[in-house]
Every structure is written in C-alpha cells, then in structure tokens.
Image (tube, grey):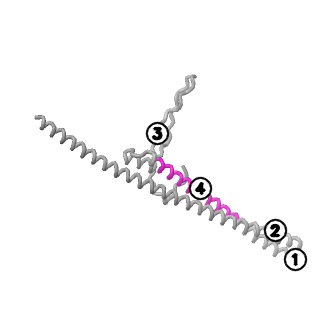
Amino acid sequence: MVLYHPKNTSRCETTMETKPAPAAPSGGMETAVSTVPKIRDIGTIALEALGKIDTVLAFELSVMNDHMKAMEGENALIKAENDMLKAKLVQQKEDEADIYYYLHKKLDANYEVIAQLESDIQTVKLERDAMDKAFHIKQDETQDAFAKEKKELTERIESAEDTLHALEVFRERKIVLEDTIAAMESTLAAEKDNHKK
C-alpha cells in the first residue's frame, strides 16, 4: 500500500489470486482473466491460525496495520519535502555568498548597485529565516501528530492481539470440555444399557 517501515515486524505474505473479469457484453467478446496480487497480512495469518474464530477482530487488526503503514509512508514523504527545503536553504546561502563577493569586487564602482544588493540580501535573509522557522514548526507538528497516532494504533493492535489470544485459549478449553462431556455421555449410555440388562 505504502512504504514499509523497518521497525514494523508485522509478517506480510503475497500470493497471486486469479479472478475472472466481468461478463462481456452480448457481442461475443472473450472473458478476460486478470491476475491480482493478494496481500496476506498479520490479520489474515492470525485468522487462519485461530481457525477463523473471530473475523471482525482479525479484520480490524489488518486495517490498523495498513493504516499505520500509510502513516509511515506519509511521514517519509514529509521528510523528503523537508530535505528539499533544506537544499533550497543551502542554495540561498550560496547565492548570498556570491552576492557578497560581487559587492566587494564592485565596491568602488557603483554604490547604488551596492545599496540595492544589500537590500536584496536582507530580503533573502528574512525570507530564509521565515522559511526555516516554518519548516521546523511544520516538522515538529507532523512528527508529534504521527507519534501520537502511531501510539494509539499500537495500543489498539496490542489489545486486539490479547483478545485473539484469549479467544484461542477459550477455544482450546471448549474442545477439552466437549471431549469430557462426550466421554461422560458415552459412559452414561453404557451404564443405562447395563441397567437394562
């Protein structure tokens, strides 16, 4: 879906699923078959492992994993944009150095040009400072929002995993109980047969 974060240890497997295309109009066109990749994420794997105990919890777990990956992808895009802004700032600093060099070379030749260039330099400095400040504010806000949402999603995933584990334990106990009841019913039936004899 999006970028895969290296710290995300969720297991994700890909299989290929073949789906027939929709029926062609009544014109004799052949039916196409498209091959579409099917993603098996942790929710699907957990669902299969638990014998399809609770489809809703497994689906929610899958959706939360996908959403977290999407948030990590958005954060990567924002970081790339921030890197681009940093490169622009570096370029502006280099341009500023070139302007200063020109000023020193032409100092005795044209004072009006010098005054105009100094004004331009001041304008560039103000714009650069404003851009730098906006960049840091945006970066801090984005990282704080991402960290908060990631924490909430992580807590929800852990809660869902705990619930799935509890359901698995319940399923195992239920099987044992059903086996015990079946054995008791068999014993009871045998005793009834003995009493009849």
Residue 112 at x, y = what percent? 89, 72
Using the rendered image of the protein, determine whether residue 149 is visible from the camera's viewpoint. yes
Snapshot quadrant of residue 28: top right
Q: Which mark is first along the chain, 1 or 4? A: 4
Q: CA distance from mark 4 to mark 2?
A: 36 Å
Tag 1 secondary structure: loop
Q: Which residue is mark 1?
A: 108
Mark 2: give few (<14), some (14-19) or many (20+) Cα within 10 Å: some
Image position of 180 with respect to 195: above or below: below
Check contact, mark 3 vs mark 4: CB within 8 A: no
Q: CA distance from mark 2 to mark 1?
A: 19 Å
Q: Which residue is mark 2?
A: 120
Q: Which mark is first along the chain, 1 or 2? A: 1
Q: Which residue is mark 3?
A: 17
Q: Which mark is first along the chain, 2 or 3? A: 3
Residue depth check, mark 3 versus mark 4: number of the one nearer the observer: 4
Check contact, mark 3 vs mark 2: CB within 8 A: no
Tag 2 secondary structure: helix
Q: Which mark is residue 137?
A: none
* Mark 2: amino acid: Asp
* Mark 4: amino acid: Glu
Q: Residue furthest bottom?
A: 108
Q: Which residue is mark 4?
A: 74
Q: Residue at x 53, y 59 (%)?
A: 150
